[in-house]
Image: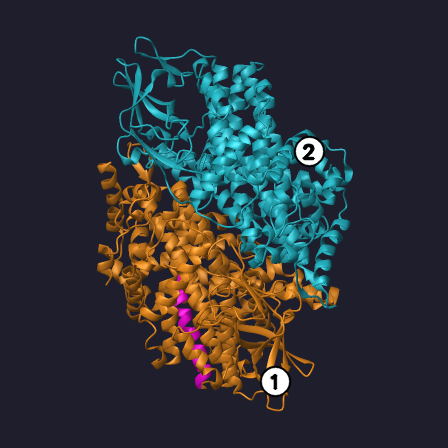
Chain colours: A cyan, B orange
Amino acid sequence: MGSSERSTLLSLEEYRSKSSFDVKQMFEEMEPPEYFEIKKKVWHFLASNPLFHVDYKNGSSEKAKARAATQLKVFISSSGLFKHIDNMSYRDRTKYLLIVNEALEIYNANVSIKIALGVALFANALNCLGSERHKKFYTDVWEGKILSCLAITELEHGSDTKRLKTIARYDALTKEFVINTPGICAAKVWVGNLGKQCTHALLFAQLEVNGVSHGLHGFVVPIRDPQTLQPYLGINVGDLGEKSGLHGIDNGWVMFDNYRIPKENLLNRVGDVNEEGEYETSFTDPQKLLGASLEILSAGRVGIVNESSNNLLRAVIIAVRYAAQRRQFCDSKGIETPLLEYQTHQYRLFPYLAATYVIKNFSNEFSDRYVDCVAASREGSLEMKQVSRMVSGVHAVLCCTKAVITWTTQRAIQETREACGGHGYHKAAGLGDLRNNHDPRVTFEGDNTVLLQQTSNWLLKLYNDPDERDFTVYPLSMFKFIDQLDAILSKKSDVTNVETLCSVSTIMTMYEGLICWLLKTTNRKMDALKSKYNDRFVARNLCQVFKAKELAIVVAEFVMICHLKEKIMLSKRTSVVIVLKKLFSLYGLWCLYQHLPLLYQGGFFSSPLHTDCISDAILSLCDELKGEAVTLVDALSPPDFILNSVLGCSDGKLYERLMNAFRQQDNGGIPLRYPDFYKAKL
Amino acid sequence: MGSSERSTLLSLEEYRSKSSFDVKQMFEEMEPPEYFEIKKKVWHFLASNPLFHVDYKNGSSEKAKARAATQLKVFISSSGLFKHIDNMSYRDRTKYLLIVNEALEIYNANVSIKIALGVALFANALNCLGSERHKKFYTDVWEGKILSCLAITELEHGSDTKRLKTIARYDALTKEFVINTPGICAAKVWVGNLGKQCTHALLFAQLEVNGVSHGLHGFVVPIRDPQTLQPYLGINVGDLGEKSGLHGIDNGWVMFDNYRIPKENLLNRVGDVNEEGEYETSFTDPQKLLGASLEILSAGRVGIVNESSNNLLRAVIIAVRYAAQRRQFCDSKGIETPLLEYQTHQYRLFPYLAATYVIKNFSNEFSDRYVDCVAASREGSLEMKQVSRMVSGVHAVLCCTKAVITWTTQRAIQETREACGGHGYHKAAGLGDLRNNHDPRVTFEGDNTVLLQQTSNWLLKLYNDPDERDFTVYPLSMFKFIDQLDAILSKKSDVTNVETLCSVSTIMTMYEGLICWLLKTTNRKMDALKSKYNDRFVARNLCQVFKAKELAIVVAEFVMICHLKEKIMLSKRTSVVIVLKKLFSLYGLWCLYQHLPLLYQGGFFSSPLHTDCISDAILSLCDELKGEAVTLVDALSPPDFILNSVLGCSDGKLYERLMNAFRQQDNGGIPLRYPDFYKAKL
């Protein structure tokens, strides 16, 4: 027993000693220290407050919901984390809130989502869609006096928001809106916080004035008495029961039957009912409106990208540390071999390790760009046309990256759970709950498949209309190569040696070629189908698979590696850059391997040697990363208490902790203290 | 509301009316009626006994375990399903038990696994490894007086069974075995039924006699008093806590400290300790021993293949019926379009629908072949050498198909849950629990990655040693083409029209070519690595990814389509055959698309036109299956009560049932009655 424990500990330390770079340098390269300081505050609060310590027993969902409700209240009111946010600029506040959300989510997804829905997105919506008269709600929600929810999705309609049926009719006599749910199919469903805890709903309903419909508008609708949490009379509201995960979130449903709210509760930035009881479109600065609509559409998705990157990171840390310690089968000398030494195991984990670096970097950098974009729209520092193009571009990039990142994370969690064998199935491994809690991200805040179409539509517009191509603004700046489309398409790859193939520039060139080819052929297919059927809907439907969908996926990967390329070019840390390049290449080539049919189809590849070369390159990168993997996860790892997995602790006491978990002793005994390598980082 | 319900009902009926074949004919083609009669008995018992009705509330795992324990007792003792099994032949009994297991598992995975581990596999092991003196355990377990568990895996070792450390020393003085656990790393863990309920363990431990170790042997070890379920003194046993799923199963751990059991409890078919206290290898018919070892190794995996095929089926039924009813976005005429009409959605679901037919058929047919093989070994009707080759072949085929089928099912469940959007995340959809309960199958009874190596090793032996190629016996009969390897490899594909590509023979030819190429190149790489490193372990490790692993996966797909090809060739039902061919082609081409890099690498494909053609073929097959999909799932569907999903009911009342589930009324109200199409089947 003693010897086994020593040997697993040795494994981790041995691997740490093999890495070619310094853990602290990598950490500094990947995360701005001031962001990390914010995270440390969040983690310190969670670790020091027993209310947030993990309960390893599955209990009823009722209990989980009650617990998350209390945690939410305490986190808002006692953590001290939100005291100064009103004094911050828009830019600083938004970044700050995104980082707090990230730090909380990696440890407690339920509360982070409850706060996001109930406080942050509500406050955002008031900011973007409301006016001075809604200030009180804003103050109250940040002070924890009220809690909101976003009621959009109905039983029968989700993605197709135009067909939502909940109606708010204006009653000029009483100056109220009368809200109705025309049948069960229009019940608002899946609304987080609505089941038990919220006091107000941010409701989206069709506004009708004098018998004329004016489309979807937002309303603040009182649901429960903030003192007693008793629902008000006249609405039919309830918790919608058991889900596949996120058991602490009280998703609910609600149906309205002539439920009345004051006229003032309409969020009136875009349109309002005037004193004469007539609907009028409000005058507002169109540039600010653009930023506001981006904020409304995208804030949640930016959060999801951040959260997913952390979920991916968490899964990969657990599996890499496990693989370094778990030994199975003896080599020819009779020495038991760590899983990390097996080619199959490297191929399972290292592409996801590379993806973690690519995605974490993108998530950090893109959040900044997103905030810049909204800020630019608020400040009026750019031309209207530029803002408009930035806003569409940021939206398009966010749609495809949200899809690709949430899917990559879902697959990574599954792969890592399998790579941890049977032990990965234990609750204390952390991977089962991680998968179940991450899962809804692939369909909420925009179903991934639908989102990809937003991106491909934007790209096709760019392709067809050179006027749209303002490559001076982000994110269009990454697509400058489209101007050389024909020249790019005429080039065939002649790369058949591994070293050249692994270079950043070769991979970028291959991506550019693939994007050009997909743009051209998707567009051609679309045109042909339009001529054939004379029906835009049919044509668009029939050119998704192998065309528009692939285009959006390839673009998401391209955008993410562009960001890492920039980091690589700017960094002065030589030994760090060498490893980052390998991660860049492994991620890029691993993705391109999956696109090989398209590369042959597009004529970029023609010889069997091309596949030989890309396969060899992937295996050789995996082999090179074997000695770096443990330090690479150390560099991005939160402390063990936050990582919260008996398989993934940094101290190498794998079997002792696992057996403690099996014995249900000491909750697996994960320490609050920061491990040594972590101190080295700080 | 009313209109919505009618329209969704209409959707299902409309699609049913579009199919080109008769539901009853397809049903008869796919399942022998006598098997179905057995399933109906199981389902009738489950539906008529409230103890088995689903509780839609998540509760504590303690409660789930207690409930499953009671269900197990009642199912064994009151269902009447096991009354006559002692009078059955080996062949009939085994098939019968596999079918009962299948029928139970699709509705209640916890109890089916508890019975498999606690009764069926234990009884099997007694049969195969024990002797007359163990008869009493056999009778007792079938009468429900005792319950067993299989204790093999230890904390530190699973796949590498040679390194298991639990030791059973023979004490000649008392004629007992003294069992010890040398340290926590040798604790038996993950043992299903051990946590709370079992009375006996079938323990695998290193047998030591007079200081000499004789390797792993099986022992029947009393754990708890059958009356009180109190564990016996001297063993340290417990439940290992929360898992990612299968909450009704009491997985446990146990450590032994000089725990004594009688000499007779050694399963002594292979070796025994004689009256003089000396170890002696028992004489036994080597042919029977072969069958016995196959039975021990494989019985659980055959069960897993059957169960997975049902889990896949269940996921696909739910998603196809949902997609037929769920409408989103309007076409150019303003009509809302069912998801089933979207190309992206067809491409998500129909390959899995095709996989369901391929895998269900394989699972049925292979179970028969497997039972034949064990029976042949018992009856001595074949030559020793033939039996030996059959046994190795069946083992090899089962290893790779177990891996591919469990993975395909895992991916299908995830894809279908996403294809059902947010609603797929509700517990009453059934997909979350299905995923979590299916999940351990990819790592238990042999980790998939490790199992694939068993298959590739077998194939490489076949490649290198023509003496091994006895193509007269199953499953080698499917690999006759290997004799023509060089001729096959010299052929290049010139198929660039969709119709030819979709034909059964073209797809078979492509698979044969791919297998030959992978055999040759894997072997070549292995040889080169052996020369380079002079180390078998290193060489084998370094030729897995893109080579040996792919070889085993491709062979699994090939074996499964071979079985469907046979059915297609033998069937007299013309309209059924037309659709089965489409399913064959879609599955085959969908898999081959994923192997396109290898097809180009092997020189089978060389022109971009090949990818054009395979892509077009897949999309055109999806389009052709649009009108068949609903009837295809109807033909294999269990009654709604057993399917147990508010999204997948056959009656088209999607939104009504879903809203009932949200309101937590009536448990989603799934009826016990058999739907109309089901009656048509009988």
Q: Looking at the rendering, which quadrant does residue B579 occupy? A: bottom left
Output the chain of dot 2.
A
* Number of numbered labels in the structure image: 2
Q: Quadrant of the C terminus of chain B?
A: bottom left
Residue at the spot of label 2? A567
Asked whether, in this view, residue B346 is left or right of residue B336, the answer is right
Asked whether, in this view, residue B342 is left or right of residue B154, the answer is left
Residue at the spot of label 1? B174
Relative image position of residue A135 (x, y in whole percent):
47, 16
Q: Could you classify mark 2 by the number of other residues whose Cα lies within 10 Å: few (under 14), some (14-19), or many (20 or more)?
A: some
Relative image position of residue B383 (x, y in whole percent):
49, 86
Q: Quadrant of the N terminus of chain B?
A: top left
Residue drawn at point x = 70 percent, y = 81 percent: B211
Which is closer to the viewer, label 1 or label 2? 1
Output the chain of dot 1.
B
Q: Please check the rendered image and state whether residue B370 is part of the magenta-colored stretch, yes or no.
A: yes
Q: Closer to the camera, A232 or A616?
A: A232
Q: Which amino acid type corresponds to the residue marked 2 in the rendered image?
A: Lys
Return the mark for residue B224. none
Residue drawn at point x = 65 percent, y = 63 percent: B185
Which range is magenta? B360-379
Callout 2: SS: helix
Q: Which amino acid type corresponds to the residue marked 1 in the rendered image?
A: Thr
> Can residue A616 be seen from the camera position used here?
yes
Q: Please check the rendered image and state whether residue A128 is part of the magenta-colored stretch, yes or no.
A: no
Mark 1 and mark 2: Cα distance apart in space: 73 Å
Callout 1: SS: loop
Taking A493 as reference, is B372 above or below it? below
